[in-house]
Image (tube, helix red, strand yellow):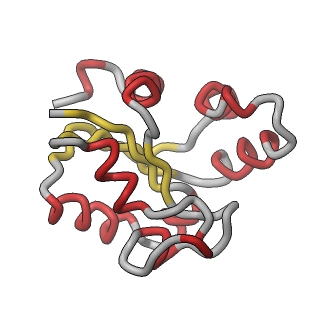
């Protein structure tokens, strides 16, 4: 069993896509072991996107992710990281296949509905940023 971090971004929350996205993961067989809605602080956003700090798009990332509520979750299942990323689709909606979350719902690269951990190390770090151990089932 593997765990991964997933976040429905402010655009997905605003558009009422949380339930549909959760349902897709549950239908696939993933177990939700952590779930919360929150507004991300600027400090948490900067820690979450720390690897992009020196890139020109960093301020826009922080501004967007703090612009409204998000839903953070931890999913568990076999090969969760790779399988969730496959279900999410390519980062840029123009490259995301129909049937993927981004292919079906994302509008722009800046508003692409969902985030998911890319590696086991990212998953561990991101889960720890958003969840205390006692908040996970």
43 in relation to 88, above or below: above
83 in relation to 23, above or below: above
123 in relation to 112, above or below: above
The answer to which image quadrant residue 135 occupies is: top left
Screen quadrant of the N terminus:
top left
The answer to which image quadrant residue 5 occupies is: top left
The residue at 55%/43% (across/down) is 39
Q: Is residue 26 left or right of residue 132?
A: left
Please tell me how many numbered marks the rendered image carries: 0
The residue at 29%/52% (across/down) is 83
The residue sitting at the right extreme is 56
Q: Position of residue 73 (x, y in %)?
A: 34, 43
The residue at 42%/80% (across/down) is 98
Screen quadrant of the C terminus:
top left
The residue sitting at the top extreme is 133
Q: Position of residue 53 (x, y in %)?
A: 77, 29
Q: Is residue 83 left or right of residue 42?
A: left
Q: Is residue 82 left or right of residue 16?
A: left
Most foreground residue, 22 or 100: 100
Q: Position of residue 133 (x, y in %)?
A: 27, 19
Q: Position of residue 95 (x, y in %)?
A: 57, 71
The residue at 78%/40% (across/down) is 58
Q: Is residue 88 left or right of residue 133?
A: right
């Amino acid at each position: 069993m593997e765990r991964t971090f997933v976040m429905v971004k402010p655009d997905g929350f605003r558009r009422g896509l949380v339930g549909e996205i959760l349902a897709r993961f549950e239908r696939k067989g993933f177990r939700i072991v952590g779930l919360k809605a929150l507004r991300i602080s600027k400090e948490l956003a900067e820690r979450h996107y720390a690897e992009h700090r020196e890139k020109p798009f960093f301020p826009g990332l922080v501004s967007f992710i703090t612009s409204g509520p998000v839903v953070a979750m931890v999913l568990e299942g076999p090969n969760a990281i790779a399988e969730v990323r496959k279900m999410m689709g390519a980062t840029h909606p123009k490259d995301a296949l129909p049937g993927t979350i981004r292919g079906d719902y994302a509008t722009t690269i800046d508003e692409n509905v969902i985030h998911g951990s890319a590696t086991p190390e990212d998953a561990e770090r991101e889960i720890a940023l958003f969840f205390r151990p006692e908040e996970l089932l």
